[in-house]
Amino acid sequence: MSFLKSLLFDDWRRKVIAIALAITLWFWASGNVATELSQPFVVTTSTSSALSAHSMQIGVPEGWMLVQPKQGASVKLLFDGPRTSLQQFFASPCRASYQAVFNAAQEVDIYEIPFSPIDLSWAREAEAKTYLTEIQETRQPLQVLLFERRKELSIPLSSAFLRIQGEAAEGYAAQPDTAVFSPNQVSLNGPSREVKRVQRALEQAAQGKGVNYELLEIARISPNQRDTMRLELGLSQRAKEAHLQMQPSTISISLPIRLSELPTVNWIPAATDLSHTGKPIAAHLQFNPWSISPWVATINDSALLGSKFTEKWVRDHIMLFAHRDRIPEDAAEGFTIPIEWALVDIQSADLKKQLMLALTVGPESAGAGEISVHKLEK
């Protein structure tokens, strides 16, 4: 016990100093021993001064774009040197830049450049080159830069590009086929291969196969939606990841929400409900008595009425007529003129215009929407 006590406490000041010196020497030695460290750098093609402390700025030739590594990606580079020196180097801004220069034939859309971190221009050139030369170039994670020619394409927008998510209120449904786009045409800019994919999708849509390209963001329908939605949509995440850009960056869409089963009125007009308009070209040509048959009226937006869509409303506001002045002078016996319809007793011109677009009126059976002509005996 006395031996252990003397070992610990005899001449304890020198022992404490020795331990402190040993620890200091260990930290000094570990900081100055050469070691290999990796440091991530953010890839950018921007010339903005607001770059991160550890950024790798790649200058891209006009008409081209960098696709590998992608802009914004984090790329690790290997450095070799004393640990303390490397940590001090990384602790301060150590930005790097590289200007790509090449001449590619017009038919070439993809161009690859062998790359080494030694080729970079550094803010602290001497230190960076010292720490990089000890690393074999084949061991660096980044070996090549891949560029792709930039293409532009103007495309018309249609409902084929809409991807709808969610459901409207019970009994209502979205009507993408009648959606209105503003603007109805956009300009796409991006890698040639991706632009060509969009072009092929458009060609398939023109053949009635539908668009199999996710160009726009998803149009999300709000719960309990009962009327037209106004949406602002930009490029989909997939399109952004493919480096596509759209001008304008967002588009406005009016997406109609209508009743799934349209309000319908079936009625049988009276013989006196058909009006004859216009002066006949030839007095000896007259309409035959009208063969009365059932007619059908539907409305895709009954909210316009401010009341229920009923048979009384139809009889009060829908007039059927035939133009006598459209009977040609040489019309043969049995020549037919189509029966048309118009709105009456609607005070607002704007409401009348909207109702004309919302209403569908016609005979229940084909061929019943005409009236025939006969010749009077001279």
Image (cartoon, grey):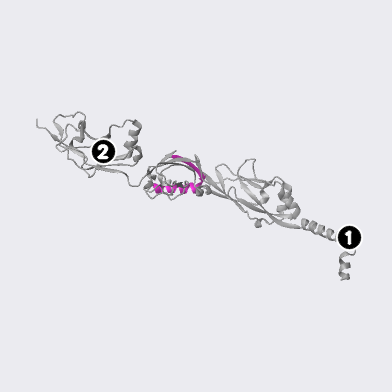
Number of callouts: 2
Residue at the limit of the structure toward the right, as seen here: 11
At label 2, the amino acid type is Lys
Residue at the limit of the structure toward the left, as seen here: 378
- Could you say which is closer to the camera, residue 275 or residue 347? 347
Q: Position of residue 110 (x, y in %)?
A: 54, 49
Q: Secondary structure at mark 1?
A: helix
Numbered tag placed on residue 285 in the rendering? none
Q: Earlier in the sequence, mark 1 or mark 2?
A: 1
Q: Residue at x 83, y 58 (%)?
A: 20
Numbered tag placed on residue 312 in the rendering? 2
Residue at the limit of the structure toward the front, as seen here: 307
Tell me the quarter of the picture where residue 351 sits. top left
Graded by Cα atoms within 10 Å as few (under 14), some (14 to 19) or many (20 or more), the crowding at tag 2 reads: few
Give the extent of the magenta segment.
Answer: 184-205
Q: Which residue is mark 1?
A: 13
Mark whose residue sits in front, 1 or 2: 2
Q: Position of residue 205 (x, y in %)?
A: 40, 47
